[in-house]
Image (cartoon, rainbow, N blue to C red):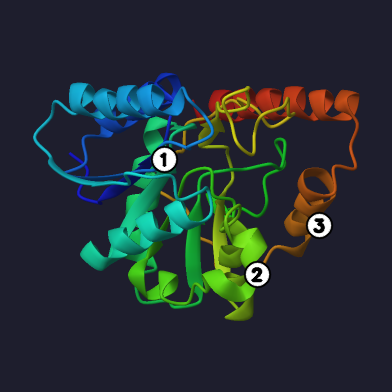
Amino acid sequence: MLDTAVLLIIFNRPHTTRRVLEAIRQAQPRQLFVAADGPRVDHPDDEEKCKLTRAVVDEMVDWQCDVHRNYADENMGCGPRPVTAITWFFENVERGIILEDDCVPHPTFFRFCEELLEYYKDNERVMHIGGNNFQYGRKRGNASYYFSTFTHNWGWATWRRAWKLFDFEIVPPETRSHIWDFQWLKAVRRNNGLAITPNVNLVSNIGFDESGTHTGGSSHYAGMPTYFMSFPLTHPIIIQRDHAADRFTDYTFFRGAMNLTQRWKLQINDAMTHVKRVLLAR
């Protein structure tokens, strides 16, 4: 069983929630926190979809587990609901893993987070442990992970000590109903913090469809494959940002500067690189 607590944030997508919960079920955390947003008044189907999504939790949590629920009666929005959920989570635990209802982790993601939450528990500069890798097969350094200032949050982990530095109100009020991850990125950078990025992708976002709020269209990052993280973990010798990796992420992920053909080639390269690593490790 997994000793580290897990927070699952859900809304109105029973089909994706089921897949994420199946991955959580395999890990069998001793404590599972579930936070749900409520139905939107201008979406008649939301009430039934929210009910079905919550029913998935009741159905699938069949292992020995303390389940804590925080369900909103009304819709709070995709900014305030994650923030209140994460704050509630860290009012109850010192450290934990956070997944949203469309982020499916590889089985090794949980051990990766658990070991690093313990390893860096007293290092206040390390604020975020991510599950995503958008380097397309480029291994950064000789360790199992590298340090970045980008806080990818399609599956991540952190500590209460780090979340205390989060400030939801650094963006204008009209924007807060829509975003929270930008404020988290700013909290890490404002405090000279670092985010851990695995050298293989450990979480796949399956939510790029018409049911997504921010992921309603197609994307080159939709459903990216996940890979096995090897153990024991190899730690970087020096705790410092990998500037080359961050420049690459900024260029490809945030600026959208690469065309479709280039990204497909990089995805193929990523898969081939992983196969080579597996063969060499035998």
Alpha carbon of mark 1 to alpha carbon of mark 2: how far?
A: 31 Å
Q: Residues within 10 Å of mark 2 (few under 14, many from 20)?
A: few
Give amino acid for label 3.
Arg
Alpha carbon of mark 1 to alpha carbon of mark 3: how far?
A: 25 Å
Q: Quadrant of the N terminus?
A: top left
**Nearest the eye: 70 or 191:** 70
Most extreme residue toward the left is 64
- In the image, residue 193 sits, relative to residue 225, either above or below, namely below
Kindly tell me whether residue 148 is visible in this rendering. no
| Kind of element beneath mark 3 | helix
- In the image, residue 120 sits, relative to residue 215, either above or below, namely below
Residue 58 in the image, given as x and y percentages of width and height: 19, 27
Residue drawn where x is 59% and y is 61% of the image:
176
| Kind of element beneath mark 2 | loop
Give amino acid for label 2.
Val
Q: Which residue is mark 3?
A: 247
Which comes before the other along the chain, label 1 or label 2? 1
Image quadrant of residue 14?
Answer: top left
Kindly tell me whether residue 210 is visible in this rendering. yes
Q: Residues within 10 Å of mark 3 (few under 14, many from 20)?
A: few
Residue 84 shown left or right of residue 137 in the figure: left
Judge depth for marks 1 and 2 and give the one in front.
2
| Kind of element beneath mark 1 | helix
Q: Are marks 2 and 3 in contact (CB under 8 Å)?
A: no
Residue 194 in the image, given as x and y percentages of width and height: 57, 68
Residue 277 in the image, given as x and y percentages of width and height: 59, 30
Q: Which residue is mark 1?
A: 109
Judge depth for marks 2 and 3 and give the one in front.
2
Which comes before the other along the chain, label 1 or label 3? 1
**Nearest the eye: 145 or 83:** 83
Q: Which residue is mark 2?
A: 171
Residue drawn where x is 57% and y is 43% of the image:
132
